[in-house]
Amino acid sequence: MATGYRNIPTVDGTYDEDEERLTALPSSTEPLIGDDGDNGRKGPGDGERVGLWIWLLTVSAGISGLLFGYDTASISAALLHLAPSLSTPEHSVTTWDKSLITSSTSLGALIGGLFAGLLADYMGRKGVIYVADALFIAGAVWQALSTSVAAMIVARTVVGLGVGVGSLIVPLYISELSPPSHRGRLVIINVLFITFGQLIAYALGIILSPPTLSQDASWRYMLGLGGLPAGLQVVVMIFMPETPRWLLQHSRRNEAAKVIAKAYGNLTAREVDQVITGIEAGVSADTSDTLTEKFKLLFSVGGNRRALTISCLLQGLQQACGFNSLMYFSATIFSMIGFKNPTATAMVVAGTNMAATAIAFNLIDRLGRRRILLLSIPGMAIGLLLCALAFSHLPVLTPVTATTPNTASITNLWPPILIIFMAFYVASYALGIGAIPWVVQSEFFPMRVRGLGTGMATATNWILNFMVGASFLPAVELMYGGAAGLFVLYALVCVTGTVAVWWVYPETKGLRMEEIEEVLREGWGGVGKRVD
């Protein structure tokens, strides 16, 4: 066995001492979950350090994450100011209009995320990033020039297409370039960019709000500035490579070897060849599969089906827990309960999200994905129940009056207590379910169905995102208990999600993407690991 490469057991559990098993994967007799996730196995590029180039690649691609965060959060402050500009003598902007403007981004993201995976198989991962940038720029300009609710809904849908494309392609791009030992952390850098974009959106919401600018100009600048980072990324990505896995699938081995050597850093020519050979084991050279054939492979093969189920479960849970109701409407909520500067108060949510995501960056490749999820999701349930308790001690919220703060409610202690409880919930979310689904969906699927599988998982995320965005304000008005009842419902979703993750989710820390396929080939990877 070659020194430094993974000592993989054969099917019968023994070790092959006579040859280098460069393409072998864990056998079905191995435990699916070890305490450390990788059983101490190391291979080329799996050391503690990776090359500087991989960090540059990650940051360059992560600009799409910043745009994702900025465009989904900037609407929170803009909603406070856009009604007069979009109202007409015949129609004033209503709560339902605001919900449609907000949720149209999610609808666009649903469509963009579903098709981005298919485009990525044909255009390459890098090419699809350019598509996302074009949509971000077009949507930003369209929003800034909108003069009606209908125009704003269309503009937000175009932005949503960019968000959906970017939310799928960037984790996929980073995952396919990353060594196993750093894959989780590198993908979380993209999530950090998302949270940073959200923080920037809230900060600009404060800076650009009246009296700095007129009410009409303020929201137009807030939304229009989203096009600038996209233009920067177009230039930066010219110097970035395509992923080695996509290159190998298209029979471009020499180019793939150059990318591996530059991205991983400090590898000998022989080690580069070992990495390439290991990747080739999971890459089909046949790129002629029709969409129907890809669907058949995704649903007829047990391992693919389980990968899709787990990916969709986590992406659905990320939205069904109600987090984006805070991201989209936090300024509206804080205005309704009496804060004089609701956008500044909403920065607590964004700041906590970013800080906790930074902690997740340091933990994900140490503790592992499964362990973090089983700690953080119950924490979310507790945080949501505490928020519901705080809401039950506040006056009935009325979203229609969001631009006229309820200053009477700020005189008691419950509004600041609510902030603390929300921060606890947001921190629990960011540590686990906020980041890990983007890691999982990129690493679970075999290359042949990776584009379609990640597209369907991303679509699940945005379907639930749309439902949460469209229903939140009406639910607060109509649901028994108002916001308190709604947050109890979100908590019940988290309890259910904890059980599901405990039952089916395997640990994948430290495994190559090609090895992860084997984990789900014969059963689920959690407590129910042998149940089909």
Image: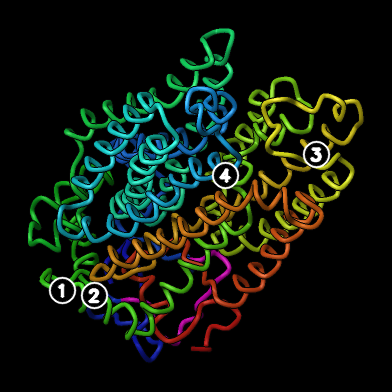
Please name whichever residue, 142 or 249, is drawn nearer the observer in this view of the structure: 142
| Separation of marks 2 and 1 at Cα, in angstroms | 6 Å
Dot 2: few (<14), some (14–19), or many (≥20) neighbours within 10 Å?
some
Q: Secondary structure at mark 2?
A: helix
Label 4, on which residue? 96
**Above or below — where is 355 with respect to 365?**
above
Evaluate if marks 2 and 1 touch, with contact meaning CB atoms under 8 Å apart: yes
Q: Earlier in the sequence, mark 4 or mark 1?
A: 4
**Relative to 457, is 300 on the left or the right?**
left
Quadrant containing the N terminus in the rendered view:
bottom left
Q: Could you say where residue 507 lies in the image, as x and y percent from the top left?
A: 51, 68
**How is the structure coloured here?**
rainbow
Label 3, on which residue? 418
| Separation of marks 3 and 2 at Cα, in angstroms | 47 Å
| Separation of marks 2 and 4 at Cα, in angstroms | 39 Å
**Label drawn at residue 294:** 2
Q: Could you say where residue 334 lies in the image, as x and y percent from the top left?
A: 72, 32
In the image, what residue type sits under mark 3? Leu
Q: Could you say where residue 272 lies in the image, as x and y percent from the top left?
A: 20, 54
Q: Could you say where residue 466 lies in the image, as x and y percent from the top left?
A: 50, 53
Please name whichever residue, 120 or 45, is drawn nearer the observer in this view of the structure: 120
Q: Which residue does the image show at 55% across and 76% down from the upper left?
A: 504
**Above or below — where is 12 with respect to 116?**
below
Q: Which residue does the image show at 65% across and 31% down from the upper left?
A: 331
Span of residues in magenta: 25-37
In the image, what residue type sits under mark 4? Trp
Evaluate if marks 3 and 1 touch, with contact meaning CB atoms under 8 Å apart: no
Q: Secondary structure at mark 1?
A: loop
**Label drawn at residue 290:** 1
Whether residue 27 appears in magenta in the rendering, the answer is yes
Q: Earlier in the sequence, mark 2 or mark 4?
A: 4
